Structures are given as C-alpha cells and as structure tokens.
C-alpha cells in the first residue's frame, strides 16, 4: 500500500485542495471494478498515468490559486469598466473606509480599552519585491510607538519575531511572529539595564528542526528557478514567487509539492505571492488574538474593543475570530474588492498611519477630558 499525503489548509481549501490525506492503495484505487477499456494497459502503467494526471491537475489548480491575490480578489462578472466600478462601489458600501467610519468606531470604544493588533507586511510597510527590504518608515514607527503608549498593541505577522523586530525596533509592544506561533510580551529592563522580551507561548517548538531541514531542501530544489526565494520564519517558512516568471510557477509548485509529500505534519497556505508552509497544528493569527486578549485579562470581558488591521489571507483568521466574539472590528487593507470577514477597509499603509494617528489624538483628548 502506498500512502500519498497531500498538502492542506485547515482554513480555506487552499490551492483548490480540500483533502487532508489521500491514501492510495493499489487495491482500493477503484471504488468498483475499473472500466474494461483500461485493461488494454498493463495495470501498473495505468496506475502511474492515473497518479500523474492527478498530480498535474493538482499543480494546475495550485497555479490558478497562485494567480489570485490574497485574500481572494473578487472577480467582476463582466469585463467592462463600468461594471468594475459598480463592483467597487458596492464593495465599499459593504466594507466602508475606517477613516469615514471613524466616529462610529470611537463611539463603540467609549468606556472600553482598545487593544490594537497590527499585521506587518502590506499593513505597516508597503509590499516590495524583496522581502528583506520591507522597511517601515520612521514616520510609521513613531505612529506605532504612539499607539503602543496609548493602547495595548501587538504586531501579528507571518515573519519570525527576530526579523520583524529588526524592522520595527520597538520595545513597547507584543510580538506574535510565525503566524501567531511565537508570542512575546513587551520587553522590560532588568536591574542590569538589559532589555528582555518574555516568551509567552510557542505551541510549535518541536517543529523547529523540521522547518530548518525543509528550508535547506527547498533552497536546494528551487535554486535553479530565477527569483524564487525561501525564507525561514522559525516555526514556519515562506517560498516567495513575486520575482519568479509566471511561466515557472508550475515548476516551483511542483518542487514544493514534491517536498511536502514527505512531511505530512506540515501544511501549505497562501499569502501575497508567497506559499507558506507551517505545522498542521490548530493555531493561527485568530488563536493568537484570543490568547493575547486572555493574557491581558480580557477573556470574557465586555470592556474591551479589539481592532485588527491586516491585508492578507492569514489575517482573515483574526477577522473571523472578532466576528465570532461579536467584539471589535477587523479592518482589511486593500485597494481592490476582496472576499473578507473584516468590517471596514483602508486602502494602503499611508491610510493605516492616518487612522492610527487619529485614534491616538482621540484617546489623548478623551483622557484629557476625564
Ligand atoms: O503576516 P505578514 O506580516 O503579512 O507576513 C506575511 C508574509 O509577509 C512577507 O511577504 C510579503 O511581503 C513581502 C515584502 O513586501 C513581499 O515581497 C512578499 O511577496 C509578500 O508575500 C514575508 O516575507 C513572508 O515571509 C510572510 O509570510
């Protein structure tokens, strides 16, 4: 019997796959007797062709999904620009700008503690070609620092904490790295004047050696594909294809698939021009949000207003948790209509900065009036 493990997402059926594990046994490949015509082939050759076709179809659906933005961009029913504009208008009515809804948001915050959750790439820093150069501006850093001085604040990212901290360089905030699988509290100065960040939760510690191994294998297997880049995010990893010619996306997906069949405890999810590989544990940015609210003493509290701002498919887990809690607001950063669980939208990091500044000003005024 051969066991063929197929890559999965626990959230959305990603890359067109819903299956978790496909067990293909030679005797059980056919649910009933195979059609007679197939017996013109030797049986083993037929099975091989059958598996190859399944594999090719799978890769084709991966590539289709790689073409989509993240979260999935809503497709217009027509190709003309008038109906495109209609689609945009109806989307912005459903997910209005958090700037135009500012008064509603702060009204909902009256008498409550705002807890701010911020994604990094595409939210605090613009999306750039080279993931190692996704710098935050000085202005945005100052804004985030002000936010953290006014409200408990966490950066929730797919990056490793070390990497994101090297960009953000702030001590006053919580960091939830590796899609929430690595959570640290703000750093405190000890009696020797050293700053120490406290690890709060690392549910996937056992996976570190496996992630390191898979990073090495994938670096080797993709080095012939120009533009491909593998990023070690400590408890997970990213295979970037933003700079890969679209003609080679299928080849890249094939390499990733060929590695993952040997690692059934890893799964594949998708971000913005990136394939993300992570442990199959039930933990994501939404769980990290719940964990942080609990750590802050707001587990069953009505006195809290969590606000989560993010641009990516992985942020949808957190938007969904907010909807389930019936508390707070998810804000999707996007210029184009996308399928989302957020309540409001902002177009880009400069609007995120404007929104955060207004929130800080509002809080200072409110505290001053008390
Ligand atoms: O949760 P996030 O903070 O949004 O992290 C998700 C991924 O972000 C990074 O990749 C994305 O940003 C890059 C820089 O702008 C861009 O080049 C890439 O195409 C985007 O997917 C990061 O490098 C990944 O490891 C994260 O998984």
Image (tube, rainbow, N blue to C red):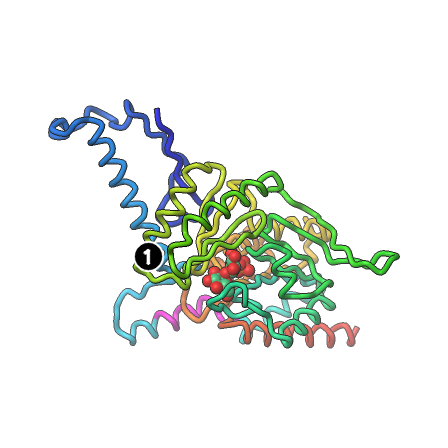
Residue 364 image point, x, y percent: 74, 75
Q: Is mark 1 within 8 Å of ligand 1?
A: no
Q: 122 or 361: which is nearer to us?
A: 122
In this rendering, the answer to whether 365 lies above or below 239 is: below
Residue 310 image point, x, y percent: 54, 62
Q: Residue at x 19, y 24 (%)?
A: 33
Query: Residue extending furthest right?
Result: 191
Q: Would you say residue 311 is visible in this rendering?
A: no
In this rendering, the answer to whether 116 lies above or below 263 is: below
In this rendering, the answer to whether 319 lies above or below 279 is: below
Residue located beneath label 1 in the image: 248
Displayed quadrant of residue 309: bottom right
Dot 1: element = helix
Q: 266 or 352: which is nearer to us?
A: 266
Quadrant location, the C terminus: bottom right
Residue 152 image point, x, y percent: 71, 61
Q: Residue at x 19, y 26 (%)?
A: 43
Most common secondary structure along the magenta stretch: helix
Q: Residue at x 48, y 69 (%)?
A: 128
Displayed quadrant of residue 108: bottom right
Q: 321 or 177: which is nearer to us?
A: 177
| Tag count | 1
Displayed quadrant of residue 272: bottom left
Residue 257 falls inside the magenta stretch: no
* Residue interval drawn in magenta: 87-97
Q: Would you say residue 250 is visible in this rendering?
A: yes
């Amino acid at each position: 019997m051969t066991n063929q493990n197929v890559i999965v997402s626990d959230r959305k059926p990603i890359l067109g796959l819903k299956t978790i594990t496909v067990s293909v046994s030679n005797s059980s490949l056919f649910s009933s007797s195979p059609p007679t015509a197939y017996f013109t082939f030797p049986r083993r050759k037929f099975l091989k062709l059958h598996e190859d076709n399944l594999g090719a179809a799978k890769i084709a659906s991966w590539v289709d999904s790689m073409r989509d933005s993240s979260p999935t961009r809503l497709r217009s029913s027509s190709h003309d620009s008038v109906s495109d504009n209609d689609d945009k208008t109806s989307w912005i009515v459903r997910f209005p700008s958090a700037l135009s809804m500012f008064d509603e948001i702060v009204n909902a915050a009256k008498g409550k503690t705002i807890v701010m959750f911020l994604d990094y790439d595409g939210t605090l820093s613009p999306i750039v070609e080279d993931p190692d150069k996704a710098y935050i501006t000085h202005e945005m850093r100052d804004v985030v620092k002000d936010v953290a001085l006014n409200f408990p604040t966490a950066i929730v990212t797919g990056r490793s904490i070390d990497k994101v901290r090297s960009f953000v360089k702030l001590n006053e905030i919580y960091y939830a790295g590796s899609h929430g699988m690595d959570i640290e509290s703000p750093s405190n100065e000890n009696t020797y004047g050293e700053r120490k960040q406290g690890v709060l939760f690392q549910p996937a510690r056992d996976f570190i050696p496996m992630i390191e191994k898979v990073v090495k294998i994938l670096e080797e297997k993709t080095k012939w594909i120009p533009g491909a880049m593998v990023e070690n995010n400590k408890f997970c990893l990213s295979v970037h294809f933003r700079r890969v010619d679209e003609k080679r996306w299928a080849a890249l997906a094939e390499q990733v698939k060929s590695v993952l069949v040997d690692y059934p405890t890893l799964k594949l999810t998708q971000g913005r021009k990136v394939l993300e590989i992570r442990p199959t544990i039930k933990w994501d940015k939404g769980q990290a949000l719940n964990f942080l609210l609990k750590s802050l003493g707001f587990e069953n509290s009505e006195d809290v207003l969590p606000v989560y701002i993010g641009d990516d498919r992985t942020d949808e887990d957190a938007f969904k948790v907010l909807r389930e809690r019936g508390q707070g607001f998810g804000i999707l950063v996007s210029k184009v209509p996308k399928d989302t669980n957020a309540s409001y939208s902002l177009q880009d990091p400069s609007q995120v900065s404007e929104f955060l500044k207004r929130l800080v000003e509002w809080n200072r005024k409110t505290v001053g009036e008390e």
